[in-house]
Image (tube, grey):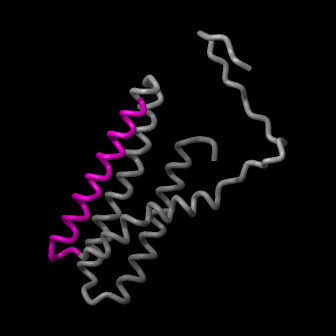
Amino acid sequence: MTDKVPMIRSLSLKVVVLLLIALAVGILITNNPIAYVQGIGLGGLFTLLKIYLMDNTFKRAVTKEPEAAKRFVQAHYMLRYVLSFIVLFVGIATPTIDGIAVIIALLTLKAAAYWQGLTEPHTPLDGSVEFLKWEDNDEPSDF
């Protein structure tokens, strides 16, 4: 997919599908289904939030100078990790939430990203695809 919005929606849909699968399997094998559902819910909501936080970060980063964009993306990367740690800590420290379910829900983003990569069309390496050349109006092109 070449457009960002359908890619974000597609990734979010894959996360939701994986969360539902994890929810169905987990309810069957856990001793406390209520805590498991709460854990999947907490981790799942945060996972979907992370997708949109990443999208927003990259949309804002492309409007910045290269060095400023690099620092901006790195800062938001660390912010997402700190927020993930907080969600994980809350899930583990709260007795009414299953910590394993939170971990599973947080890992669905990784699994959905791999799944997304498998469903994306591959670019042929034989040179049969033409790429558009980007021209900067302010500076002459090196090509």
Q: Quadrant of residue 35?
A: bottom left
Count every numbered label the image shows and give the total.
Answer: 0
Which span of residues is magenta-colored?
69-97
Q: Quadrant of residue 120?
A: bottom right
- Quarter holding the C terminus? top right
Residue 38 in picture, x, y percent from top left: 26, 72
Residue 69 in picture, x, y percent from top left: 42, 30
Q: Principal SS element in the magenta part?
A: helix
Does the magenta segment cover residue 76?
Answer: yes
Does the magenta segment cover residue 85?
Answer: yes
Q: Nearer the viewer, residue 70 or 105?
A: 70
In the depicted structure, whether residue 39 falls above or below residue 134? below
Q: Nearer the viewer, residue 141 or 129?
A: 141
Residue 1 in picture, x, y percent from top left: 63, 47
| Residue at the (30%, 76%) spot, across then down | 100
**Would residue 89 be found to the left or right of residue 8 on screen?**
left
